[in-house]
Image (cartoon, rainbow, N blue to C red):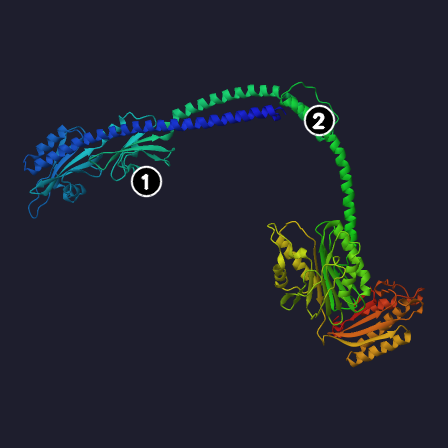
């Protein structure tokens, strides 16, 4: 824990900073010293390499001078050639053999080619090269020597007879302006090795002499004589300026090579110095200095730690008390202090903060309780507002001509957008979409008032224009807050698809049909709640099968992404047109909302979003054609008469006797139950019957204006035991109906009860 204190951390930072400075300065000094040492080493090594090359040049020069003199004498026609050769060998110990080889001339007899060599004991041996089995004039030394008018050194070779490594120095004998022969001197290379061995090279360094063919003529490591140098070494030795060359990939680590060309030859002398040896002394010196510096810094750091810990000790007490504050424990005492420095002022301020924090926590607790109460009320308000809205999906059981799907997303817990729909009577269907001017709780209350009034005023209205007019008059009363709502109201004739629309300053709806989408631009009135005398023109249109009308609020078109760009009307139209086209009302709303979500890309929602899609599903004539439509009184004789009429209509339509019997049995059971249960106390009423053919299947719709009666909720009877012995009779008829029809849907609205029965076609029954 001691090393977590401020004093310890300050000391550590001081040590780290000092070490960093020491390392940086030491590294710079080390680099500077390395550069100076390398420069000094280059100078010494270059001088040593050049001195060794000069020694070799001096000895080779004596051989060259003696050979050139012999060539001059041979060209002047001297007759005692062998004596000249002997005297020259005695005078120059570096020469192992001398030969004067005349060139063959035409058909003349070949002249003598004296050759004098020095044996191992120092005695001289003579022989005539013309008598050798091999023709000397065909040898490389003779052919090459003819071209050496000023003398030249040739390739080294191993003499098989003398078992020694030799090198030739050849000079062409000039007579009458042409080469008439060659004076050739064989030079041993032992002396070359001796020169390298006597050089005083630094520890770890070595020298070598490289021939023109890239092979070692001499090497400090005698075993490498005759071996070819590495490609990197040959490239370094090819430089003629004598500048040092660093060879990084040398065995054992990087080395420096100091080449010195041997003038008068194609040889070069090289001095190799390992880089590690050059820097060995400076590295040791640097490490020793760095160690002493670190030890000094460590001592300074220890002194700093002790001093800082004594000075900052009161801060530890404050830190301990701060932990009490973090746990919510504010009832404690601080040690008295009379210091007037920063720590004393900090102690006083901390004590004052402790008392203020306790008071603030009491206030915060009260505010939190109030916020929780408001959050609970908002959640209840959200539930109430949601309950005011009808279900998202609507497909009426007594009318399969249209489908509706709606979605609402409030920007806050409660919002001002609204939608609603309801049957005005058994034929007319009303739908509303609106947007209140404000947001939050005021908008939610105004929205609730709007929906409640709309449902209350709808029975008194014959058109959307009249409903908006009555609603506007009611909302204008006592509207001191000047709130308003834009509304789009429509009334749909569920039989023929005629739709009347009236707009109170709302967004234009979009009509999707076929492969096109268009906005329905028509005259609108002002928003509801602003002008009590306002009027709202009506726009009439007829929906075709497959058409979908899309109603929405400006939360769609004004949805913004992170750059504040808006979704806009064009993107709305593009979304509705994008393939593949949706096949249902829910498909249109789902696609549009998904495209809006992708566009905003997680940006916060600024406004409520509402969208409602109304799809007209009326089938083409011939596929869903009515067979019989009638209304009868709710008496049993009229019911049985209606059943007989239905049977005759099915007979004329070509329905089989088996299917007609099923329909007759089901109609009898259901219509008798309607008379008995939908009309208690024998009240008078009417029962509507609609018989349709749908692709071979039979669809029967029964509409009654009695009290609510839902036969689909009748419990299934227990069929165990003998049915004849049952004490309670009932439920078997409805159970039989369920078994004979493929679908049975019920709904109830202001127009009464609506029951839809679907009989499968005979082909489906046969296959099953």
* Residue on which the image places disc 2: 352
Q: Residue 163's x, y, as percent?
A: 22, 35
Q: Residue 120's x, y, as percent?
A: 19, 30
Q: With respect to residue 256, does 528 lie above or below?
A: below
Camera-nearest residue between 624 and 170: 624
The first of marks 2 and 1 along the sequence is 1
Q: Is residue 248 visible?
A: yes
Residue 451 as seen in the image, left or right of residue 279: right
Mark 2–mark 1 distance (CA, rounded to whole Å): 82 Å
Name the quarter where the C terminus is drawn: bottom right
Label 2 or label 1, whichever lies nearer to me, is 2
* Residue on which the image places disc 1: 231
Residue that appears at 59% across and 21% down: 308
For the image, the number of numbered tags is 2
Q: Is residue 742 visible?
A: no
Camera-nearest residue between 5 and 557: 557
Camera-nearest residue between 427 and 732: 427
> Could you classify mark 1 by the number of other residues whose Cα lies within 10 Å: few (under 14), some (14-19), or many (20 or more)?
few
| Quadrant in the rendering for residue 25 | top left
Q: Residue 99's x, y, as percent?
A: 13, 37
Camera-nearest residue between 48 and 592: 592
> Could you classify mark 2 by the number of other residues whose Cα lies within 10 Å: few (under 14), some (14-19), or many (20 or more)?
few
């Amino acid at each position: 824990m001691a090393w977590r204190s401020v004093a310890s951390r300050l000391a550590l930072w001081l040590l780290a900073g000092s070490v960093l400075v020491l390392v940086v300065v030491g590294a710079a000094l080390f680099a500077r010293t390395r550069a100076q040492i390398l420069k000094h080493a280059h100078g010494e090594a270059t001088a040593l390499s050049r001195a060794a090359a000069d020694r070799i040049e001096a000895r080779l020069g004596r051989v060259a001078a003696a050979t050139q003199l012999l060539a001059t004498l041979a060209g002047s026609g001297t007759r005692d050639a062998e004596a000249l050769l002997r005297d020259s060998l005695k005078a120059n110990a570096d020469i192992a053999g001398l030969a004067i080889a005349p060139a063959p001339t035409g058909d003349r007899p070949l002249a003598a080619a004296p050759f004098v060599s020095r044996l191992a004991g120092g005695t001289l041996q003579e022989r005539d090269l013309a008598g050798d089995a091999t023709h000397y004039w065909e040898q490389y030394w003779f052919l090459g020597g003819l071209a050496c008018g000023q003398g030249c050194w040739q390739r080294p070779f191993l003499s098989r007879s003398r078992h020694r490594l030799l090198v030739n120095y050849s000079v062409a004998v000039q007579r009458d302006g042409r080469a008439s022969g060659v004076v050739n001197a064989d030079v041993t290379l032992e002396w070359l090795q001796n020169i390298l061995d006597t050089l005083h090279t630094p520890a770890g360094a070595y020298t070598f002499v490289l021939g023109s063919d890239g092979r070692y003529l001499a090497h400090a490591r005698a075993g490498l004589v005759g071996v070819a140098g590495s490609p990197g070494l040959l490239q370094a030795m090819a430089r003629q300026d004598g500048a040092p060359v660093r060879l990084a990939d040398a065995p054992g680590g990087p080395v420096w090579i100091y080449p010195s060309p041997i003038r008068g030859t194609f040889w070069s002398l090289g001095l190799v110095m390992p880089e590690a040896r050059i820097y060995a002394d400076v590295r040791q010196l640097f490490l020793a200095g760095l160690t002493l510096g670190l030890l000094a810094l460590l001592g300074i750091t220890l002194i700093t730690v002790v001093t800082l810990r004594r000075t900052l000790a009161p801060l530890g007490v404050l830190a301990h008390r701060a932990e009490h504050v973090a746990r919510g424990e504010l009832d404690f005492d601080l040690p008295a202090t009379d210091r007037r420095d920063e720590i004393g002022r900090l102690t006083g301020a901390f004590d004052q903060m402790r008392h203020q924090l306790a008071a603030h926590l009491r206030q915060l607790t009260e505010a939190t309780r109030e916020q929780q109460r408001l959050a609970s009320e908002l959640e209840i308000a959200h539930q109430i507002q949601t309950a005011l809205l009808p279900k998202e999906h609507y497909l009426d059981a007594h009318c399969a001509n249209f489908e509706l799907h709606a979605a609402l997303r409030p920007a806050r817990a409660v919002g001002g957008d609204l939608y609603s729909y309801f049957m005005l009577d058994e034929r007319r269907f009303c739908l509303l979409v609106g947007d209140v001017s404000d947001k939050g709780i005021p908008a939610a209350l105004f929205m609730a008032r709007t929906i409640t009034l709309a449902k209350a005023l709808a029975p008194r209205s014959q058109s959307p224009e009249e409903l908006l007019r009555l609603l506007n008059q009611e909302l204008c009363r006592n509207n001191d807050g000047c709130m308003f709502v834009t509304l789009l109201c429509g009334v749909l004739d569920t039989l023929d698809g005629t739709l009347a629309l009236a707009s109170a300053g709302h967004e234009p709806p979009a009509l999707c049909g076929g492969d096109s989408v268009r906005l329905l631009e028509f005259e609108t009135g002002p928003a509801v709640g602003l002008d009590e005398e306002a009027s709202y023109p009506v726009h009439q249109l007829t929906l075709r099968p497959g058409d979908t009308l899309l109603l929405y609020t400006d939360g769609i078109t004004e949805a913004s992404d992170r750059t504040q760009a808006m979704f806009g009307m064009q993107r709305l139209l593009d979304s509705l047109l994008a393939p593949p086209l949706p096949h249902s009302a829910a498909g249109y709303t789902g696609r549009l909302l998904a495209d809006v979500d992708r566009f905003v890309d997680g940006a916060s929602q600024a406004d409520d979003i509402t969208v409602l899609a109304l799809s007209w599903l009326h089938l083409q004539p011939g596929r869903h054609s009515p067979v019989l439509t009638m209304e009868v009184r709710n008496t049993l004789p009229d019911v049985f008469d209606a059943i007989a009429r239905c049977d005759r209509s099915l007979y004329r339509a070509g329905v089989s006797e088996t299917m007609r019997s099923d329909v007759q049995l089901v109609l009898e059971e259901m219509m008798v139950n309607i008379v008995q249960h939908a009309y208690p106390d024998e009240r008078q009423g009417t029962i509507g019957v609609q018989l349709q053919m749908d692709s071979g299947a039979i669809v029967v719709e029964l509409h009654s204006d009695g009290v609510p009666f839902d036969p689909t909720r009748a419990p299934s009877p227990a069929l165990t035991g003998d049915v004849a012995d049952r004490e309670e009779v009932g439920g078997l008829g409805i159970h039989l109906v369920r078994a004979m029809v493929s679908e049975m849907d019920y709904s109830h609205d202001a127009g009464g009860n609506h029951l839809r029965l679907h009989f499968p076609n005979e082909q489906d029954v046969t296959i099953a």
